[in-house]
Every structure is written in structure tokens, then in C-alpha cells.
Amino acid sequence: MTARTVVEAAADVVASGRCTGCGLCTSLEPALTMATSSTGYLRPRASGPGAGDAAALRTFRAACPGVTVTAQRPPGSTYHPLLGPVLGCWEAWATDPETRHRGSSGGVLTALSSWLVTTGEATAAVGAAADARDPRRTVPVRIVSRDEALAAAGSRYGPVGVAGHPEAGAPGTVTTGKPCEVAALRAASGADAPLLLSFFCAGTPSQHATDRLVTELGMPATEEVAELWYRGRGWPGRFTVRGAAGTEVSTTYDESWGRSLGPTVQWRCKICPDGVGESADVAAGDFWRTDERGYPLFEETAGASALLARTPRGLDLVRRAAAAGVIGLREIDPDEVAAVQPLQRTRRSTLAGRLAGARLAGARLPRFRGFGLARLALGGARASVRTARGTFRRVRDGAAARS
């Protein structure tokens, strides 16, 4: 049955395992709010049948990343097969030592957001931060000062729907979000989209993974969690929990992501064509130091980002921020970035196989346009076939439905 309302359309996306939890639908339909599902992911929940707004339904169908995602081709950009549109590429870092230390990889996005709001160039910044009431959870936040930007610095490896924040996508704002959130805002706003910043993303883990890790590390169940951060405060930083009574427990980024968080990434993220923020004006990722095999080293050091300007507006922002002394830059080749991002490289190059396997097993998938996935698969046909077979088995056994 064809959906007649945003409520019905969103329910269909969730039921078919295509939801990213971005939150966009809640900005289109007042009857929808985001809630944590039984499996620990954010999903829209309806309080009623909805308004039946035809324009909102059209926007949902054009912008929901569970329905469709289209690769961007901004004017003047070169399209890199693994990294998307590029107008400029640098190794970058915040020049302010505190911002660089607090950020996950050099603090560049924090520095840009802070600079834009403190100079008045942006009326507000929208991003994600720990919930003040329960720091194990992550919530969308409004930022209007340097202190608020610093408080929100660092990656949050838990469910959050930034695209559902009332000011995400509002004129005059700057929004930092996951690639799916930024793609949704870009598609919903079109030429009127505000400044959009994004970051390289490996997917959204279940909230249950964070909760389990807190317990496994030895935080007493009777002690209230006062602070929790996943990364940052060094590079890459440690997963750290502080209790209200002074207890502190932590583990390495490699252990927290590799053993606890990463394995719980939701199904829709495993079929994502864009883990690098292609729809943003500016995107940043870890510019890892690597071993002789090209795999990242997680030794603590001063943070460094790979920074990509994707649009003329993004290129202008980066250049002005550097001229103002907000960020430091060293120009690099995009291939250098792809070389130190093995997860993004492998996922992108084998995605056509994963999608084929999922379709053969009967999964309903979003439409992905313009990403050149078939051409990438041809360069590693054997790996794509293996991926297709493995995905077919997992989907057939119900893995997609469970997330």
C-alpha cells in the first residue's frame, strides 16, 4: 500500500530496516518523535495518524536517506571515487590548543563552528553532545558560544538525530551532522541549505553497546555517570566514564570501537554509500598515521584531520578560517586521505556486492544515485562477490530486520 502520510512513510522505512535514525521526519511531521527502539537505535514513533501534509510527504520521499541518497556534484569540484566531490584537501588542525585537544581529530569542525558563532557569521550552530541528564546518551544541541562548542567537541558513538533539531537547516545556522543527516538536510533544503559540516562516519552503534561497556569497565551501578566521552581529549583519545562520586574507568579507542561499539552498527549503516559526508560543504576525518600495511596506528599524539572542501562555499570558509588563524592547513592529495581510511575504502569498493546480496535475499533498499558503485566493484570483483554471498546469508537469516 502506498503511504499517504509522513507517519505511514516513516513506518514503512523503519519496518524494512532502512532507517538511519537521522530525525528528519520529525521536523516534517509533529506527530513523530524520536525514541530508542528495543535494539538500541533511534527510530520515529508516532503519537497519532499525522497531518497528511502532501508537501511534507514529497519532501520526505526526496530527502529521507532511508528512501534515496544522491551523490552531489558541486560546481568546480572533482569527483574522487572514494571521497566524493573535492575542491580542496588538507591536513588540518585547530590552532587553539584546547580546541585541538578536546576534538576527536584535531578539533577542526569545533574550531569552525565556534568561530562562526562567536563572530556572528552564524546565528547558531547545531550539533550533538552528551545529554546533561544522562551523559551515556547523545542529543542534538544548539551552540552559541565557544564554551558550548568545546562542551560538544569529540565524536559521539551513539544514536542521535541531529536533522530533527528545530534549527537544523534553518537560515543563518551552521549544522554539523553525520553524513546521512547532512544528506537529508541538503535534499530537504535544496539551494536554501544552510552551511553544512560533516565527518567521516563508520556507522551508528546501538545505545545498548555503550551501556554494556560502561558496566564491563567497572562503573558501579549505584554511582551516577557524570561524564562520558568516546574520544578526544587527546588523539585518538580514550573511551572514558566519570562517576559523580569520583570513580573513573576507561579503555582505548581501538578496544572500545573494535570490541564493543563497532560490531553493533545498525544495518542501514552497513549499506551506506556515503561514509565521508559528500553532501556537506566541508567534511573532516582522521588523518591517521599508519603502519607499513596502511592500517591506522592509535598511538596518542596531537590530533590531525583530513579536511575536504566540497563546495565553493566550503572552500571559502576554509580559506577564511585559515587566514584568520583559526585553523592550520597543509595541502595534501585526496589519495593520501583514501590511503589511511581502510574501512571507508573497503566498504565503498565492495558496496555494490553487498547491495546485490541484500536484494537477492529479498531486502528492500534505498535508491543510491551517482556514487559509481558498479565501477568500484569491477576493480575488486572477487571481494565484491564474497561480500555479496556473505550479505545474502545474513539478510536471509534476519540480520537486517533485527536492527
Image (spheres, rainbow, N blue to C red):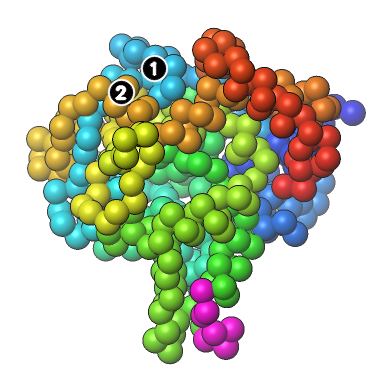
Identify the element where label 1 is drawn.
strand
The answer to whether residue 163 shows anywhere in this view is no
* Residue drawn 71% across the image and 20% down it: 356
Disc 2 marks a residue whose amino acid type is Pro
Q: Which mark is residue 334?
A: 2
Q: Which quarter of the image is occupied by the N terminus?
A: top right
Mark 1 or mark 2, earlier in chain = 1
> How far is mark 1 from mark 2, CA to CA?
8 Å
Q: Residue furthest front?
A: 292
* Residue drawn 24% across the image and 58% down it: 101
Disc 1 marks a residue whose amino acid type is His
The answer to whether residue 108 shows anywhere in this view is yes
Disc 1 residue crowd, few under 14, some 14–19, many 20+, Cα 10 Å: few
* Residue drawn 31% across the image and 35% down it: 292
Of residue 24 and residue 15, the one placed in the foreground of this image is 15
| Magenta span includes 152 | no
The answer to whether residue 2 is above or below residue 163 is above
Q: Which residue is mark 1?
A: 80
Contact? badges 1 and 2 (CB < 8 Å): yes
Of residue 80 and residue 366, the one placed in the foreground of this image is 80
Instruction: Considering the whole magenta stretch, tell me its main secondary structure.
Output: loop
Identify the element where label 2 is drawn.
helix
Of residue 130 and residue 337, the one placed in the foreground of this image is 337
Of residue 261 and residue 90, the one placed in the foreground of this image is 261
| Residue 142 percent across, percent down from the top left | 41, 55
Looking at the image, residue 18 sits to the left or right of residue 143; the answer is: right
| Magenta span includes 220 | yes
- Residue bounds of the magenta highlight: 217-223
